[in-house]
Image: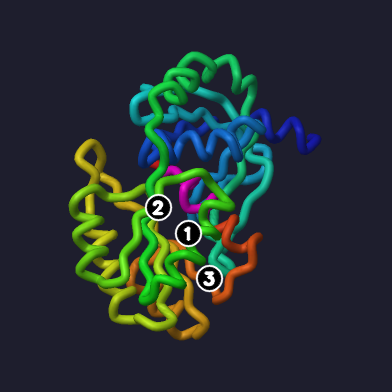
Amino acid sequence: MSGDSRQFSRTRLSLQVSYRTPGAFLVSYSVNLSKGGIFIETTTPLPIGDRVSLNIEVPGGGEMAVEGVVTWTRAHADEGMPAGMGLRFDRLEEHYGAAIDSLVRDFAGLSVLIVAASPDKLALLGRYVRSVIGCEIIEATSPEVAEVAIETSPPDLVVCDMDRGVPMGMRTIKAAKAAVRASQSTTPPVIILAGDAKTRQAGIQAGADFALATPPSSQDLRGAVIGTLCRPSVK
């Protein structure tokens, strides 16, 4: 029996996929979905060739049903990249057009909280992040300000420099992971930056989603920002 024949006999899996915010979905759409694919984070990826039915829940856009096939997998997390599988969609545009147009019309923009010990670092990180995505930048140079910003209106993303403020970074991570948006049961993802490998590891263990060495390369920062914003949750 050929490999293709075996693929057709496999059981179709149905997954419920949801995004944190309309902004997270739109970033994912512009980077991944419009090109016909999506990355699903999972420690048990399906075999390449398996077909998947996805019900994608978009805040403000309802639920969208698409079909796809597994085209690549990453069995184990490696260098900050999570384990999971890449899916290619069938006839994506037919399902998304009107809903995406509505989201784009009503979209207020992404918000990114940047936390650093000095104004110079804040300005530098702000330029880095704006070079990757269009967004509103919120700045904090103390853990108290960061906590208030997160509690008042959780941002779409938190970027925290820990080179001169490990305790501040840890408090920021804790505050971000304790925050829940009013309309969702999700918390903002956190990217940390640190020159010391032990600090980066401690940040990941505390709940940070991504850890980068300082200074980050443009490619690494872009990958971290896009990766965290594009990452949907799977039920």
Which one is in front, 65 or 62?
A: 62
What residue is pinned by disc 3? Answer: 212
* Image x and y of residue 148, in percent: 19, 59
Amino acid type assigned to the residue bearing label 3 in the image: Leu
Of badges 1 and 3, the one in the foreground is 1
Q: Whole-Å distance between the Cαs marked 3 and 2?
A: 19 Å
Point 40% across, 38% down: residue: 19
Please state the extent of the stretch shown in magenta in the rendering: 225-233
Which one is in front, 37 or 76?
A: 37
Query: Element type at marker 1?
Result: helix
Amino acid type assigned to the residue bearing label 2 in the image: Ile
Is disc 2 surrounded by few (<14), some (14 to 19) or many (20+) residues within 10 Å?
many
Query: Element type at marker 3?
Result: strand
What residue is pinned by disc 2? Answer: 137
What residue is pinned by disc 1? Answer: 126
Point 33% across, 74% down: residue: 169
**Which disc number belongs to residue 41?**
none
- Residue 10 visible somewhere in the drawing: no
* Image x and y of residue 97, in percent: 54, 16
Mark 3 or mark 2, which has the lower sequence index? Answer: 2
Q: Whole-Å distance between the Cαs marked 1 and 3?
A: 16 Å
Point 43% across, 67% down: residue: 122
